[in-house]
Amino acid sequence: MVRIEQDSLGEREVPDDAYYGIETVRACENFPVSRLREPPEFVRAYLLVKKAAAQANIDLRVLDTVRGKAILQAADEALTGRFDDQFVVDIFQAGAGTSFHMNINEVLANRAIEILGKKRGDYAPLSPHDHVNAGQSTNDTFPTASHIAIIGMADDLLTSLQELAASFEAKGQEFAGMKKSGRTHLMDALPLTLGNEFRAYGAALRKAAERIRQRRDDLLEVALGGTATGTGANSHPDFRSQALKNLRKLTGLALKEAEDTFEALQSRSTMAAFSGALRELAFDLVRIANDLRLLSSGPVTGLGEITLPPVQPGSSIMAGKVNPVMAECLDMVAFQVIGNDTTVALAAQAGQIDLNVMTPVMTANILQSLTLLKNFIPVFTTRCVAGITGDEERLQGYLQNNPMLATLLAPKIGYARAADIAREAQEKKIAVRELVLQKGLVTEEEATRLFGPSGRKD
């Protein structure tokens, strides 16, 4: 069963049971691109924008109470997820997001029409353009909904990120007494502790979280009220302030009017900066994940300084093999985040004159990055970091045979002589401690002070 709807381009058949309308049908015909639809977080954010706008228009007498209350009821029903299967537009769509915006407008309009006792598709009593979209444009509502959705998911990510940082810091305390050989340029270097390394991972993640938090706060400034080009055309003079007041109440966010509505439509710099903060986090996550893979490599021919929790068999052919799968997955998540940011960066610079029409792809990529990170980081924390153990015997073995311990002699015998000791220790394959004791360069007491206990089992 179908119904016939008409728009400015002509007529189209619309499934009779659909709450969306003709413009959504056209979008589905035009953009069968990815089979990906807008995520629930974005749908909910857009519905909150529409609800706040409808209430503002009722309060300002732009909408009569009967139509306005029907739209509000439709929005409330949609916020429960009742119409999730009706938001069918691909994330790759018309510039600025007009396709998805009209999908939202049509669903709310047709449900409101039903509430008024009329048939879906009969837009004479209530129009998706004139009533649901009163005082609004895609150009200001889409980025506003984007900001709200990103902020909500960012808050979830920040909680998970703080927990991951705390887990690394707890391991730093646990490993504080485990001395080990440092490595720079992947070569033996001066000693430190395993705890030093793990505490540093936690510190890096807290810094990354703070950068994300700062960029998240920048998104509190929204474009709502600018309508098509920033002029506020076709909206009540008090619409912007009233709608934002309602939206603050609905979201619990300290949303702010854009300082310059023209800039708010032209530029997507705050979204690009937020994505950049996710990219910076991804760089640290890749670095940390790869460190864990190196430090746990083995069990016989690798470094083997730490053991990661075994969470699944590692090979379909090699019996007993266990791989660092959690760290590998974290790498792949981070790679995707970095790739998404490249898309966001290209879209951010593609704005032209009075509007950046690439907001949909920016929103989709940022929300995907947030989804991947917020979903996997808690799993990585509990199933990997929390169960890491250090191999103190292996750590001590490497440390005692590290020729770079000769560096600690430099204040006493000079850099050149210390370098000779390092080379000789490597050639003779003996510990620096043993060599300098043989040569009488230090006493046993001095050796213990410089290099720690011998580790011999007499």
Image (cartoon, rainbow, N blue to C red):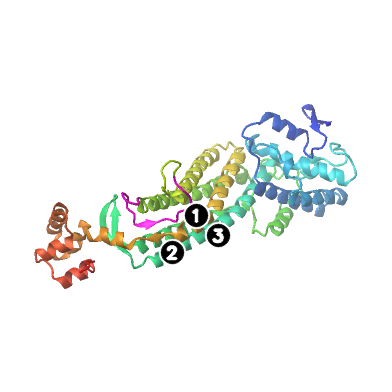
**Vertical relation: 341 (above or below) 73:** above
**Quarter location, residue 250:** bottom right
For mark 1, what is the residue?
380
Q: Residue at x 39, y 56 (%)?
A: 307
Q: Is residue 209 visible?
A: no
Please check the rendered image and state whether residue 302 is part of the magenta-colored stretch, yes or no: yes
Q: Residues within 10 Å of mark 2 (few under 14, many from 20)?
A: many
Q: Are marks 3 and 2 in contact (CB under 8 Å)?
A: no
The three-letter amino acid code for the residue at tag 1 is: Phe
Regarding mark 1 in the picture, which secondary structure is present there? Answer: helix
Which is closer to the viewer, label 3 or label 2?
2
For mark 2, what is the residue?
169
Residue 387, position in %: x, y?
45, 60
Q: Residue at x 73, y 30 (%)?
A: 26
Magenta segment's dominant SS is: loop
Residue 330, position in %: x, y?
48, 49
Query: Which range of residues does the magenta coloring cover?
Result: 298-314
Tell me the quadrant of the picture where the C terminus can be found. bottom left
**Labels 3 and 1: the sequence-earlier one:** 3
Please check the rendered image and state whether residue 103 is part of the magenta-colored stretch, yes or no: no
Residue 424, position in %: x, y?
13, 54
